[in-house]
Amino acid sequence: MKNFLLSILVFSTVSLNAQYCLFFDLKVDEPQMVVSALTEVMNTEWGKNIQGTQSLFAYGPNGTNEATHTIQFCFPDEASFEQAFATYGQSMDAQLIWERKLSEFSEIINQSLNTPIWYNGEDWNEDNVFMMYQMDVSNPGLYLKEFKSFSQKIAKKLGYEENSYGLAAPIVGKNADFTHFAWIGSPDIKTALSNTKKMFADPAFAEFSKNVSGVRKVVNTTMIIRVMDF
């Protein structure tokens, strides 16, 4: 963790006003202990002064990914991102809790810094469940054009225009398997599943899939469920 945080400072993914979101995908043996450790980290002076949001999500069905949870730190701009992770190196309390207590009960599977390319909705803290679609996209411009058109059309048809949905890309970190990911937010699991089923059955989805079939390969689909915000 420490080495990773120091390395990303060379490069200086929640509110959707956030422009950078750092994801830590974890394999967790004792979820309650991870929640306890994260609460301790966020209650340090370092945690209290982070200029962004901090959330813990649990993965639902997660394909072949070994991760069970994901920690997400999201920042509104470059300065707040740099401030948080520059000061991490100066906080012995935060480092000790993360390096010892959190690491004792979890293993980092994947880590990436992500940025939104296009999105709807001002605040994804209003959503508690997200369908995530990781993709390898060979023509980003064409895919974005088709995605914007389709996603706005289907959101209006299914009645989730006010929810958060969009397209993002990892810009730093482990991203060899995919180049982009899309998300659709919902208030709860039953709504997420119901809307996904309706979307797959809609003729607009078949047309969208046909239009992007030559430039997009879906790598993995997951569901993440908000556990708590800090």
Image (cartoon, grey):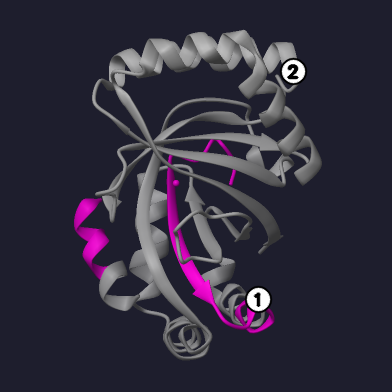
Of label 1 and label 2, which has the lower sequence position? 1
Vertical order, 9 against 140 (above or below): below
Residue occupying the point 65% across, 77% down: 31
Quadrant where the N terminus is found in the figure: bottom left
Residue position for label 2:
158
Mark 1 lies on a secondary structure that is helix
Quadrant where the C terminus is found in the figure: bottom right
Does the rendering let one see residue 203?
yes
Residue 50 locus on image (x, y percent):
52, 61
Q: CA distance from mark 1 to mark 2?
A: 35 Å
Residue occupying the point 41% across, 72% down: 108
Vertical order, 117 against 100 (above or below): above
Residue 86 locus on image (x, y percent):
33, 66
Give left or right: position of 187 versus 150.
Answer: right
In the image, which residues are magenta? 6-34
Residue 124 locus on image (x, y percent):
64, 39
Q: Residues within 10 Å of mark 1 (few under 14, many from 20)?
A: some
Number of marks in the image?
2
The answer to which quarter of the image holds residue 23 is bottom left
Q: Is 20 included in the stretch rendered in magenta?
A: yes
Residue position for label 1:
35
Give left or right: position of 150 versus 92.
Answer: right
Residue occupying the point 56% across, 15% down: 205
Mark 2 lies on a secondary structure that is helix
Kind of residue indicated by mark 1: Val
Vertical order, 69 against 82 (above or below): below
Please name whichever residue, 18 or 57, is drawn nearer the observer in this view of the structure.
57
- 1 and 2 marks in contact (CB < 8 Å): no
